[in-house]
Amino acid sequence: MDGNDRYRDEFGAPLPRYWPKEPDRRGRHASFASAVTAAFADLTTVHEPFFDSLADRWPKLFPNLPARPGRYDDGKIFLYVANAPTLYLMRPKLAAVRRTLAALPDAPKKIDLRLEIRSW
């Protein structure tokens, strides 16, 4: 007895065409364990000495900038901004921020800045 027969017995009509006959597979994880592993991987932070010192020095380096360092991921520094208009105002300033950061003594050779909207 499949789902169509049970539906017909219960309601006296065949299963509607748009009704899925079997549940579709959703999500990117095959098991609960892989989902938990991925969630904990997202929560762990990478301690990069340059980024940690940058977070401490940010208010002195850029006192009037409407962005702050948010996270460091795969060589990219993500700067958090409050909203989309602020993000668009920050885009032309990224080159100057990159030059200032490259001039710091412990800066890496390549500085990759990204903007991300986050409320704080």
Image (cartoon, rainbow, N blue to C red):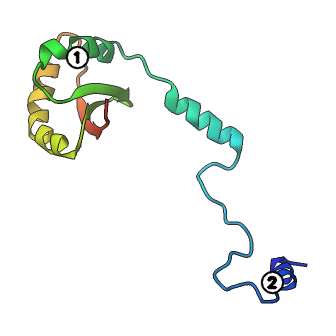
Determine whether 93 is above or below 19 in the image.
above
At x 63%, y 41%, the residue is 35
Above-or-below relation of 21 to 64: below
Q: Quadrant of the N terminus?
A: bottom right
Q: Would residue 48 appear left or right of 33 to someone viewing this image?
A: left
Which residue reaches farthest front?
Answer: 11
Residue 58: x %, y % from top left: 20, 16
- What residue is disc 1 on? 107
Which amino acid does the dot numbered 1 rest on?
Ala
The image quarter in which residue 63 lies = top left
Tell which of 12 and 114 is nearer to you.
12
Side of 6 where 74 appears, left or right: left
**78 horizontally vs 95: left or right:** right
Q: Is residue 53 visible?
A: yes
Q: For residue 68, which numbered disc appears in the image?
A: none
Q: Quarter of the image holding residue 66?
A: top left
Relative to 28, residue 21 above or below: below
The x, y position of residue 112, in whole percent, is 25, 32
